[in-house]
Image (cartoon, rainbow, N blue to C red):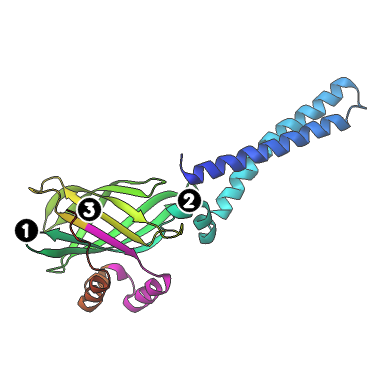
Amino acid sequence: MSRAARLRSAIAISATFVLVSLSFEIRSRVQQLNAPLGWLVWLLAFLLSLFLANGATTLLWRVVVRVRYVRRFILGRTWIEGTWFFQTTEYAVDKQEIVQVGLAQFSYELPDLLLSCSISSAALATGEPIQTELISLVLDDSLHYMHRFVRHLRNVQAVGAAYGIFVCEFGKPPKRYEGGVIYLDAEDRQKRRQTGVKLADKDVHALSKQFGAGWQQRVLHDAQWVRTACTSHPPVDLPQ
């Protein structure tokens, strides 16, 4: 069960306990009524408390999770909402080369806070856009991450998976990612590494204002921006 689901269940249980207790308090105060009427009043109060506990909790949850800061509080260290810059590095015997860059927009589907993602990618050497379709997406409470995808480039389709871990510092939500990419049709499946960094909200706002509609793909075609981003966040060394 996710952190959000546990919190939502705790709120529902607490609300039910309070309102059901209130119904018993009402029962103690109608003892002066004759027995059938007293029990009828208590039964109505009890059923009303259950209805209010469920309905009020659901309504409250649907309202509060629309607020970004509330989502951050609820999800804690697993909150990765925002725009991330990713680069994929291919390792050869004597060199390493960044072959792909991308921007991933992580968000949460309301009201259940299910993680979703949209990805814009480009081949670094040619600037050709890469269409990526997500098949599945998983992030657990220990920040281990994996998504399966279908990639389309030059009318060639490839199925693969990205796997890794989001890195926290001092218990705060992560701003860095380290992992790998595997393509099921590749001869050597273990020589691609992927790193990611979360872009600051102010930088995302500036980029969207500068490049306009469809800014993610436009940014990836800006050689100077990509070069600066790759230089600022160099790829990880290939593990021994």
Picture coordinates of residue 234, whole percent (x, y): 23, 68
Q: What amino acid does circle 2 point to?
A: Leu
Instruction: Give the Cα separation between the discs numbered 2 and 3.
Output: 29 Å
Q: What amino acid does circle 1 point to?
A: Val
Instruction: Please tell me in which quadrant of the rendered image residue 193 appears.
Output: bottom left
**Is residue 213 located in the magenta-colored stretch of the structure?**
yes
Query: Which element carries disc 1, helix, strand or loop?
Result: loop
User: Position of 186 compared to 7: left or right?
Assistant: left
Q: Earlier in the sequence, mark 1 or mark 3?
A: 1
Q: Mark 1 points at which residue?
A: 93
Residue drawn at x 52%, y 41% as measured from the top left: 6
Q: What amino acid does circle 3 point to?
A: Gly
Picture coordinates of residue 238, whole percent (x, y): 17, 57
Circles 1, 3 touching at the beta carbon (< 8 Å):
no
Instruction: Give the Cα separation between the discs numbered 2 and 1.
Output: 46 Å
Q: Residue 199 carries which label?
A: none
Q: Residue furthest top?
A: 36
**Is residue 141 located in the magenta-colored stretch of the structure?**
no
User: Measured along the vertical axis of the image, is residue 218 above or below residue 189?
Assistant: below
In front: label 2 or label 3: 3
Q: Name the residue under label 2.
A: 110
In front: label 1 or label 3: 1
Foreground residue, 143 or 148? Answer: 143
Where are the magenta residues, as a range? 194-216
User: Position of 106 compared to 21: left or right?
Assistant: left
Foreground residue, 234 or 201? Answer: 234
Q: Residue 180 carries which label?
A: 3
